[in-house]
Image (tube, helix red, strand yellow):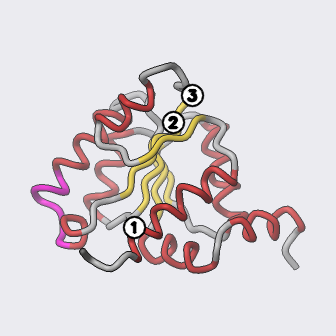
Amino acid sequence: MPSACATAYSAILPPLVREQLNARGVLAAEDHPLNQKLIAAQMQKMGVDLTLVGNGAEALEAVKTRFYGMILMDCQMPVMDGFNATRAIRAWERGGAQPEARLNPAYIVAVTAGALPGDREACLDAGMNDYLTKPAQAEDLARVFSAWAERMLAPAA
Protein backbone atom coordinates (compact mmCIF):
# COMPACT_ATOMS: atom_id res chain seq x y z
CA MET A 1 0.00 0.00 0.00
CA PRO A 2 1.47 3.43 -0.96
CA SER A 3 2.34 5.82 1.83
CA ALA A 4 0.17 8.89 2.43
CA CYS A 5 3.05 11.07 1.23
CA ALA A 6 3.39 9.14 -2.04
CA THR A 7 -0.37 9.25 -2.54
CA ALA A 8 -0.41 13.02 -1.98
CA TYR A 9 2.43 13.49 -4.46
CA SER A 10 0.80 11.34 -7.11
CA ALA A 11 -2.51 13.20 -6.62
CA ILE A 12 -0.75 16.46 -7.56
CA LEU A 13 0.02 15.11 -11.02
CA PRO A 14 -2.92 14.19 -13.25
CA PRO A 15 -2.74 10.58 -14.51
CA LEU A 16 -2.65 11.63 -18.17
CA VAL A 17 0.36 13.88 -17.50
CA ARG A 18 2.15 11.06 -15.64
CA GLU A 19 1.43 8.67 -18.54
CA GLN A 20 2.82 11.15 -21.08
CA LEU A 21 5.95 11.80 -19.01
CA ASN A 22 6.63 8.08 -18.64
CA ALA A 23 5.93 7.40 -22.32
CA ARG A 24 8.22 10.18 -23.55
CA GLY A 25 10.90 10.01 -20.88
CA VAL A 26 12.23 12.36 -18.21
CA LEU A 27 15.93 13.16 -17.86
CA ALA A 28 17.44 15.16 -14.99
CA ALA A 29 20.93 16.63 -15.16
CA GLU A 30 22.13 17.41 -11.63
CA ASP A 31 25.62 17.16 -10.16
CA HIS A 32 24.95 17.47 -6.44
CA PRO A 33 24.26 14.10 -4.72
CA LEU A 34 21.71 15.56 -2.27
CA ASN A 35 19.77 17.26 -5.07
CA GLN A 36 19.93 14.02 -7.10
CA LYS A 37 18.32 12.14 -4.21
CA LEU A 38 15.66 14.82 -3.78
CA ILE A 39 14.60 14.91 -7.44
CA ALA A 40 14.68 11.10 -7.67
CA ALA A 41 12.47 10.82 -4.57
CA GLN A 42 10.03 13.44 -5.86
CA MET A 43 9.73 11.71 -9.22
CA GLN A 44 9.25 8.32 -7.57
CA LYS A 45 6.49 9.70 -5.33
CA MET A 46 4.78 11.20 -8.39
CA GLY A 47 5.05 7.88 -10.22
CA VAL A 48 7.37 9.29 -12.87
CA ASP A 49 10.30 7.27 -14.21
CA LEU A 50 13.55 9.23 -14.25
CA THR A 51 16.95 8.96 -15.87
CA LEU A 52 19.56 10.85 -13.85
CA VAL A 53 22.92 12.16 -15.13
CA GLY A 54 25.61 14.17 -13.36
CA ASN A 55 26.45 16.95 -15.83
CA GLY A 56 25.53 18.59 -19.11
CA ALA A 57 27.88 16.47 -21.23
CA GLU A 58 26.18 13.33 -19.92
CA ALA A 59 22.78 14.89 -20.66
CA LEU A 60 23.81 15.57 -24.25
CA GLU A 61 24.99 11.98 -24.67
CA ALA A 62 21.78 10.67 -23.10
CA VAL A 63 19.53 12.55 -25.53
CA LYS A 64 21.55 11.20 -28.44
CA THR A 65 20.75 7.63 -27.41
CA ARG A 66 17.12 8.00 -26.31
CA PHE A 67 14.36 10.52 -26.86
CA TYR A 68 13.40 12.48 -23.75
CA GLY A 69 10.33 14.68 -23.84
CA MET A 70 11.21 16.43 -20.56
CA ILE A 71 14.65 17.48 -19.30
CA LEU A 72 15.23 19.00 -15.86
CA MET A 73 18.50 20.89 -16.19
CA ASP A 74 20.71 22.24 -13.42
CA CYS A 75 22.52 25.34 -14.66
CA GLN A 76 25.77 25.15 -12.70
CA MET A 77 27.51 21.80 -13.21
CA PRO A 78 31.07 20.69 -13.87
CA VAL A 79 32.26 19.45 -17.28
CA MET A 80 29.40 21.16 -19.17
CA ASP A 81 26.95 23.53 -17.51
CA GLY A 82 23.21 23.55 -18.19
CA PHE A 83 23.36 26.57 -20.49
CA ASN A 84 25.90 25.01 -22.84
CA ALA A 85 24.21 21.62 -22.61
CA THR A 86 20.87 23.17 -23.59
CA ARG A 87 22.45 24.98 -26.54
CA ALA A 88 24.12 21.75 -27.66
CA ILE A 89 20.88 19.76 -27.31
CA ARG A 90 18.97 22.38 -29.32
CA ALA A 91 21.64 22.34 -32.05
CA TRP A 92 21.50 18.53 -32.14
CA GLU A 93 17.69 18.59 -32.34
CA ARG A 94 17.89 20.94 -35.34
CA GLY A 95 20.56 18.84 -37.02
CA GLY A 96 21.30 15.21 -36.38
CA ALA A 97 18.48 14.22 -34.08
CA GLN A 98 16.11 11.36 -34.62
CA PRO A 99 12.84 12.48 -36.30
CA GLU A 100 10.84 12.53 -33.05
CA ALA A 101 13.26 14.99 -31.47
CA ARG A 102 13.32 17.24 -34.56
CA LEU A 103 9.52 17.35 -34.73
CA ASN A 104 8.96 17.56 -30.98
CA PRO A 105 11.98 19.08 -29.22
CA ALA A 106 12.53 18.31 -25.55
CA TYR A 107 10.91 20.59 -23.00
CA ILE A 108 13.92 21.76 -21.01
CA VAL A 109 13.34 23.22 -17.56
CA ALA A 110 16.05 25.00 -15.61
CA VAL A 111 16.10 23.78 -12.01
CA THR A 112 18.60 26.14 -10.46
CA ALA A 113 19.63 27.93 -7.31
CA GLY A 114 19.94 31.11 -9.39
CA ALA A 115 17.16 33.47 -8.35
CA LEU A 116 18.70 36.82 -9.20
CA PRO A 117 17.18 39.29 -11.64
CA GLY A 118 18.04 38.13 -15.14
CA ASP A 119 18.58 34.46 -14.26
CA ARG A 120 15.25 33.36 -15.74
CA GLU A 121 15.92 35.31 -18.93
CA ALA A 122 19.40 33.77 -19.24
CA CYS A 123 17.85 30.30 -19.05
CA LEU A 124 15.22 31.11 -21.65
CA ASP A 125 17.83 32.74 -23.90
CA ALA A 126 19.87 29.52 -23.77
CA GLY A 127 16.88 27.61 -25.16
CA MET A 128 15.19 26.38 -22.00
CA ASN A 129 11.39 26.40 -21.92
CA ASP A 130 10.79 27.08 -18.24
CA TYR A 131 12.54 27.86 -14.98
CA LEU A 132 12.27 26.61 -11.39
CA THR A 133 14.33 27.57 -8.38
CA LYS A 134 15.78 24.97 -6.01
CA PRO A 135 14.58 23.23 -4.11
CA ALA A 136 11.79 22.60 -6.62
CA GLN A 137 8.52 21.90 -4.84
CA ALA A 138 6.18 19.12 -6.00
CA GLU A 139 3.50 21.67 -6.92
CA ASP A 140 5.96 23.59 -9.10
CA LEU A 141 7.09 20.42 -10.85
CA ALA A 142 3.46 19.43 -11.42
CA ARG A 143 2.73 22.88 -12.92
CA VAL A 144 5.66 22.58 -15.32
CA PHE A 145 4.78 19.00 -16.22
CA SER A 146 1.16 19.99 -16.90
CA ALA A 147 2.24 22.91 -19.12
CA TRP A 148 4.44 20.49 -21.06
CA ALA A 149 1.62 17.96 -21.42
CA GLU A 150 -0.75 20.65 -22.70
CA ARG A 151 1.81 21.53 -25.37
CA MET A 152 2.32 17.86 -26.26
CA LEU A 153 -1.38 17.05 -26.46
CA ALA A 154 -2.49 20.24 -28.27
CA PRO A 155 -3.65 19.68 -31.85
CA ALA A 156 -1.13 20.83 -34.45
CA ALA A 157 -1.93 24.34 -35.66
Q: Quadrant of the N terminus?
A: bottom right
Q: Tell me the CA gap for discs 2 and 3.
A: 13 Å
Residue at (21% x, 69% y) in the render: 103
Q: Nearer the viewer, mark 2 or mark 3?
A: 3
Which label sits on residue 151?
Answer: 1
Rendered residue at 31%/58% (across/down): 63
Residue where numbered disc 3 is placed: 113
Residue type highlighted by circle 1:
Arg
On the image, the x and y values in percent for residue 20 come to: 49, 76
Residue 105 belongs to the span the image colors magenta: no
Q: Residue at x 26, y 77 (%)?
A: 156
- Distance from disc 2 to disc 1, alpha carbons, whole Å, reads 29 Å
Expressed as whole percent of the image width and height from the top left, the position of residue 131 reads 48, 41
- Number of callouts in the render? 3
Residue at point 46%, 69% (across, down):
150
Residue 119, horizontal then vertical, whole percent: 44, 26
* Location of mark 2 (residue): 31
> Which one is nearer the viewer's eye here, 100 or 117?
117
What residue span does the magenta drawing correspond to? 92-99
Q: Amino acid at mark 3?
A: Ala
Q: Position of residue 157 (x, y in %)?
A: 24, 74
Location of residue 78 with respect to 148 vertically, above or below: above
Mark closer to the chain start, 3 or 1: 3
Q: Residues within 10 Å of mark 1 (few under 14, many from 20)?
A: few
Is the residue marked by circle 2 packed among few (<14), some (14-19), or many (20+) residues within 10 Å?
Answer: some
Q: Earlier in the sequence, mark 2 or mark 3?
A: 2
Task: Say whether marks 2 and 1 touch (CB < 8 Å).
Answer: no
User: Which of the 4 image quarters holds residue 43?
Assistant: bottom right
